[in-house]
Image (spheres, coloured by chain):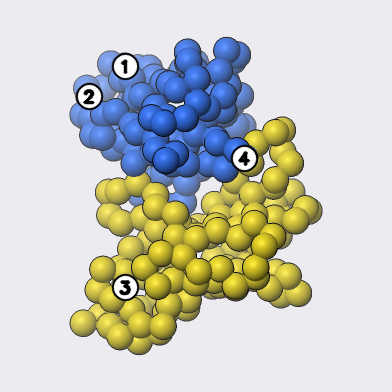
Amino acid sequence: GAVVSQHPSRVICKSGTSVKIECRSLDFQATTMFWYRQFPKKSLMLMATSNEGSKATYEQGVEKDKFLINHASLTLSTLTVTSAHPEDSSFYICSAVLKYEQYFGPGTRLTVT
Amino acid sequence: AQSVTQLDSHVSVSEGTPVLLRCNYSSSYSPSLFWYVQHPNKGLQLLLKYTSAATLVKGINGFEAEFKKSETSFHLTKPSAHMSDAAEYFCVVSDPYSGGYQKVTFGTGTKLQVIP
């Protein structure tokens, strides 16, 4: 149990376009999901907390207009990177909370050319 | 406030020898502590977790960790390294009562290299 999926696993997009990443809890409902970003050879940095039915809470330094988060249902949160630039290239990982524990997705590798 | 320090960014061991990955934490509350492993271009896999039960925690793939409150440590060990253990390891601490969910803090990671 407690499986979290992400789609796509890899995506390449052109600079200036937008890309959407989905995070799904497959066998449980999650009112809270988190989005992390991992820079090369670095640790995971929390970007935002996604709450079902309300606005996301962004960490300091994360542009909320650039990284749009929508938690439309209890099993789905989406992260949209708008007007992507090469510096947005990274590994994005989501997690979903069940009984006060976080379960992580497999990650999405975004490359902006 | 909570924080976690992984003392070694790289650890290199020979296959069949013991593994020790060090982690120290700081937390205002009784923490939950986790170790995750990440293989190249893969997501995170939970190795083990400590949640105020037994201080010696056994995880998957032969790994274990001991919670030592007096030393604020949660070091990860394995008696005999296998080639497949080569990966990045993250120590994670959480505040159990932050806003109704566990907001976690990741260590900077330790890259384990296993030499044949």
The chain ID associated with circle 4 is A
Alpha carbon separation for disc pair 4 and 1: 32 Å
Kindly report which numbered mark, 2 or 4, lies closer to the viewer in this rendering. 4
Provide the residue designation for mark 2: A13
Instruction: Give neighbour class at mark 2: few <14, some 14-19, many 20+ (Cα, 10 Å).
Output: some
Mark 3 Cα within 10 Å, few/some/many (few <14, many 20+)?
many
Where does label 1 land, which residue? A18
Q: Dot 1: few (<14), some (14–19), or many (≥20) neighbours within 10 Å?
A: some
> Looking at the rendering, which quadrant does residue B98 occupy?
top right
Q: Earlier in the sequence, mark 2 or mark 4?
A: 2
Mark 1 vs mark 3: in front: 3
Display colour for chain B? yellow
Q: Chain A colour?
A: blue
| Residue type highlighted by circle 2 | Cys
Please give the residue where the numbered disc 4 appears in the rendered image: A100
The residue wearing badge 3 is: B113
Q: Are marks 2 and 4 on the same chain?
A: yes
Where residue A26 appears, x then y in whole percent? 38, 30
Q: Secondary structure at mark 3?
A: strand
Q: Is residue A86 visible?
A: no
Specify the amino acid type for callout 3.
Gln
Is any atom of residue B29 visible in this view?
yes
Q: CA distance from mark 2 to mark 3?
A: 33 Å
In which quadrant of the rendered image does the C terminus of chain A lie?
Answer: top left
Disc 2 + disc 1, Cβ < 8 Å: yes
